[in-house]
Every structure is written in structure tokens, then in C-alpha cells.
Amino acid sequence: MAEQDFKRLLDDLRAGKIDHFEIGPEHFQEFQPVYHAYPYRTQIVGKAHIGGKIIYRLVKR
């Protein structure tokens, strides 16, 4: 996946276009820098699952 794809996923999640997305262990190293640079990352939380898959969701406040 490309960096702009990760940013689009984060933007779509924040805009409510999607309710979650998954990142597998094969893309985690590519995703982390994009996630840490994302200005609204405190509104998004990831939960790890068996096998290294992480599901990211918008935090409801």
C-alpha cells in the first residue's frame, strides 16, 4: 500500500465514510509513520488482534 492510501483511510475514517479499517503485519511498518504524522491521530485508536492484525476505529467522545 502507498502512503496516500493510508492517509485516505485515516481521512475516510475521520469523515465517517468508513467505520473501521485493518492493517496487517505486512503493512504495519509502512503505516506507522503515516499514522504518527496524522494530525488527528488522537481521535483514532487501534486494537491488536491475534495474528498481528490491527483494527483502527474512530474514538467516540
Image (cartoon, rainbow, N blue to C red):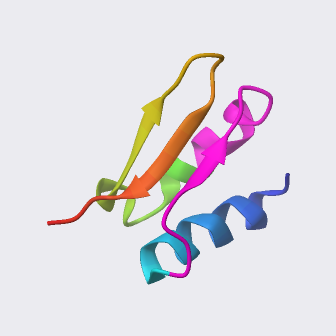
The answer to whether residue 36 is seen in the rendering is no
| The furthest residue to the right | 1
Image side of residue 41 versus residue 38, left or right = left
Image side of residue 9 versus residue 25, left or right = left
Q: How many marks?
A: 0
In the image, 27 versus 51, the foreground residue is: 51
In the image, residue 20 lies at what x, y percent?
52, 59
Which residue is at 69% across, 59% downward? 6
Which residue is at 37% across, 66% downward? 40
Which residue is at 66% across, 72% downward? 8
Which residue is at 14% across, 66% downward? 61
| Above or below, comparing residue 28 to residue 10 in the picture | above
Image side of residue 42 versus residue 37, left or right = left
Image side of residue 38 versus residue 23, left or right = left
| Above or below, comparing residue 29 to residue 43 in the picture | above
| The furthest residue to the left | 61
Residue 9 in the magenta stretch? The answer is no
In the image, residue 34 lies at what x, y percent?
61, 52
In the image, residue 27 lies at what x, y percent?
76, 36
Residue 22 in the magenta stretch? The answer is yes
In the image, 15 versus 29, the foreground residue is: 15
| Above or below, comparing residue 44 to residue 46 in the picture | below
Residue 32 picture quarter: top right
The answer to whether residue 12 is seen in the rendering is yes
Q: Where are the magenta residues, as a range?
A: 17-33
